[in-house]
Structure formats: structure tokens, C-alpha cells
Image (tube, helix red, strand yellow):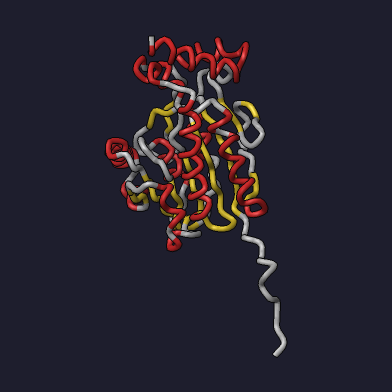
Amino acid sequence: MDRLLSNQYFEAYYRAIYRNRWDALRKSLLETRARIAFTQGLRVPYSVDPSSVLAAASLRLPDAGLILDACAGPGGKSLVLAARMGPKLSLLANEPSRERRRRLLQVLEEHLDPEQRSRVAVSGFDAASLGGRKSERNRFGGILLDAPCSSERHVLGDAKALAQWKPARPRFLARRQWALLSAAFLVVQPGASLVYVTCAISEEENDGVASRLLKKYGAEVLLDEPDFREGEKTTLGRLILPDASGGMGPLYVARFRKQAAPPSPFLSVGSKG
């Protein structure tokens, strides 16, 4: 009975969002996803969903310095970033999960040439903790945040995950996503690019989280719409859904540019002695 109720919760939640489209979208989520062999700049091709390439390619890269892939496992988007980097740019590929980090290391070793690999470091910290460290503020010249999310395609394909699903799950994940996104904003440099990505299909985890960044930081955040035109436009980004994109996705992408903080009105311009 619990499993039946969980299925009903899931169905009711997403049917309320997508209405008559839900049946077709649900069917497409259960089908085999689109894959391509990504070869650009790699010594061995990597099989990846084309939407993931679009997401990673959305990050505007500086000529030099350090960029961050905040939740990098299993490594596909890190490969796209590494393939695009100039010789003076380095990547920190961070993955807190030990198992996903093991896979990340394997992917980097297999697909990057030695020179590329030498400019990619791997770490395993909780990226949400970065914002509380003043030493990390304005450290990175660009950040890709592919945040943990509901991953409805996975849920539908896993009987146990579907049985355990509750309406509170998107809300819980949205809080985690906001912790990661707000921390990323604090540690990206003024003028740099910040790309927020999920494979969720609920607005709560997509525009809902991205909108908090604009609300909290106001003029310090510039909305920088992704360049690609696949998928459909949302209020703040683009959402690629498999029922309308040949099996690609699902993937949500929102891109921002951090502006310099406005001067405080309480700071004196000058003083008379």
C-alpha cells in the first residue's frame, strides 16, 4: 500500500505541473536517453547525453586562472570543460561522493591527455561549505554547478526509488541546491560566469532555486541566458525535455554573471581634516 501511495504522490505531483503533457513526458523518461560520442579535445571518445555537453559548454571560460566543477562526478561535464580550456586555465573537479569521485578519476585518466590531465585537480569537499570560508571568496574564474536533484528519469526507472518518493523530496533538494548555489556565488569572481544545472523537471528545483539568487543578491547578479536554443525557455533559463528533444535530457540550465558589489552608501567619499 505504501508503494502504491508513493506512486500516486509522484503521479499527482508531476501531472499537476505538466497536465496533458505528462503522459508523453513520462513515457519519454522511461525510454533510452539520447547519447553521442563526445570527441572534441579528448584522446578517447566519451559517451554522453548531448544536453550535458550544452550545459558544460555554457560556462564562459576566462583565459587564465582556476575554474570549478562543483559537483563533477561521474566526469562528463569536466571533460567538456577540460577540452575547452586554454593552456593557462586549470580546473578543480570536485565530487563529495567517494564512489562518484573514484569514477571521476577513472574518466579523467582515460580520456584526457597528460598535459590536459595535469591541469585538472580532483577534490572531495562539500561545495556548500565554501561560502562560509572568507579565504575562498572570489577564488574561481568560473563555476559549473550541476546540483544533486530529483532525477525523475532515475526515479521512474527504479522501483525502490519510486516507492520511497514523497512530495517533500523536491522541497528538500531545493534547500540543498540553494545552499550550493549561494555558496558558489560567493566564491566566484566578479565578472565571472556561474552556470546552475539540474536534471530535474520541477520548477521548484530549477527556476525556483535560480530566482533566489536574483532576489538575495540583486544588482550583483546579471542573468546571462544560455546561448543554445535546444529545449524550451523558462523564466530564467532553458529546460531540455526528452519528449520534445529527441530523447535528450532532462536538463535545466541557468547562467549568471557576477557583478562587482555596489559601493556602500555608508562609506565616506572623502573627509575634511
Residue 56 pos. (x, y %): 49, 39
Q: Is residue 260 left or right of residue 50?
A: right
Q: Quadrant of the C terminus?
A: bottom right
Image point (57%, 15%), residue name: 15
User: Horizontal placement of 186 versus 111: left or right?
Assistant: right
> From the viewer's perspective, is residue 108 above or below residue 63?
above
Q: Which residue is pictured at 39% across the width and 28% down the height?
A: 47
41 or 258: which is nearer to us? 258
Residue located 46% across and 34% down the image:
173
Relative depth, front residue between 53 and 133: 133
Left or right: where does residue 272 sit relative to residue 166? Answer: right
Res. 40 image quadrant: top left
Question: In terms of depth relative to the viewer, which is nearer, 252 or 66?
Answer: 252
Q: Position of residue 251 (x, y in %)?
A: 52, 29
Relative height, residue 174 to residue 157 (above, below) = below
Residue 7 x %, y %: 44, 13
Question: How many marks overall?
Answer: 0
Residue 86 is left or right of residue 192, and the answer is left
Q: Quadrant of the N terminus?
A: top left
- Residue that sits furthest to the front in the current view: 1
x then y, percent, for residue 247: 50, 18
The residue located at (55%, 22%) in the rendering is 241
Classify 149 as above or below 3.
Answer: below
Residue reaching furthest to the right: 272
